[in-house]
Amino acid sequence: MQVVGSVLVRDEDVFLERAIRNVAAFCDRIHVLDHLSSDRTPEILSELARELDHVEVVRSNDASTSHRVLERYAGTRTWVLGVDGDELYDPAALARLRADLEAGAHDDVFRLKAHVLNCDRLEAGRASGFLAPPSRPVTKLFNFAAVSRWTGCPERLHAGEPEFANGFDWESVRYLSEDTTWETDPLRLLHVCFLRRSSTPGLDPPAGRPSAWETGLFKRGLRGVPARLRYLRFRDRRLAAYRRAGRSWKLEWYAKGPRVDVDPAPFGVP
């Protein structure tokens, strides 16, 4: 069994180093695609790649490259973890999860979902925000033994047309939040999605950049460059509709339920 990390980032230098370091021990290899960042993201990634020999960094304007590098793992006993530059996992909790995965836990599902705190305030000793559930979970841990082939994704782990092994499909999901608490969930995530991710003014749009997963296209068959263009057009129309209605997709998806405070120290945040 192996665990592979997949990181797709653009202008996310504020939390990026911590995001990668938090999963470094959990992953046997980490594939990083820098989507033409112009802040300090390339510098941070170069330093990490020099220090961590299992981190591989590629710079490209084609986000689908981030998935093509994962296609080789289809049909093997590999778990792939998608990590964004605003996603901080708990390294100690991941160590427990790694032991469970090595023992065969969760081999019967395609995806694992977990507790997420969508953080909009981060102060000394306190992270504040909204939990998933009831907000949308964003954790992306996929069992590649459940697919014999998975191609055609406009972004890594988003969309495409996976060919499933017998007994698996998109709905083969286990929600760890159903059997754990925030404190005991081994895949728990501090999602700093409401905080500034780039130190360079103007590179971090307040509305954010929704992925294919967030726009609801993750199950559609999108192939190649035309598919990527269709996805971008669909995303832009979706965002324009929210703006016209005076709505925020980020608030509607990630700010549900009561406000919750947690200790950010386990996630490497003082």
Image (cartoon, rainbow, N blue to C red):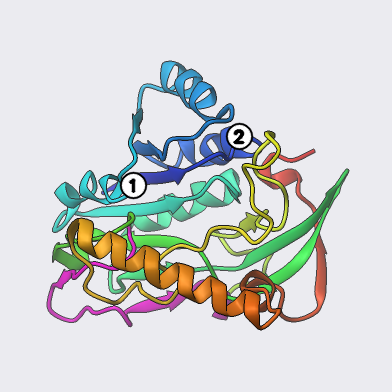
Q: Is residue 173 magenta?
A: yes
Q: Residue at x 29, y 60 (%)?
A: 228
Give the SS element for disc 2. loop
Q: Residue at x 33, y 56 (%)?
A: 155
Magenta segment, prevailing SS (helix, strand or loop): loop
Q: Is residue 118 above or below residue 35?
A: below
Question: How many numbered callouts?
Answer: 2
Q: Is residue 209 above or below residue 163?
A: above
Q: Tell which circle, 2 or 1, labels the residue nearer the N-terminal end.
A: 1
| Quarter occupied by the C terminus | top right
Distance of mark 2 from mark 1, alpha carbons?
24 Å
Disc number for residue 98: none
Q: Is residue 3 visible?
A: yes
User: At label 1, which amino acid type do we have?
Assistant: Val
Q: Is residue 145 rendered to the left or right of residue 29?
A: left
Q: Is residue 104 rendered to the left or right of residue 178?
A: left
Q: Nearer the viewer, residue 25 or 134?
A: 134
Disc number for residue 3: 1
Q: Is residue 161 rendered to the left or right of residue 213?
A: left
Magenta residues span: 157-178
Kindly report which numbered mark, 2 or 1, lies closer to the viewer in this rendering: 2
User: At label 2, which amino acid type do we have?
Assistant: Asp
Q: Is residue 215 magenta?
A: no
Name the residue tied to disc 2: 13
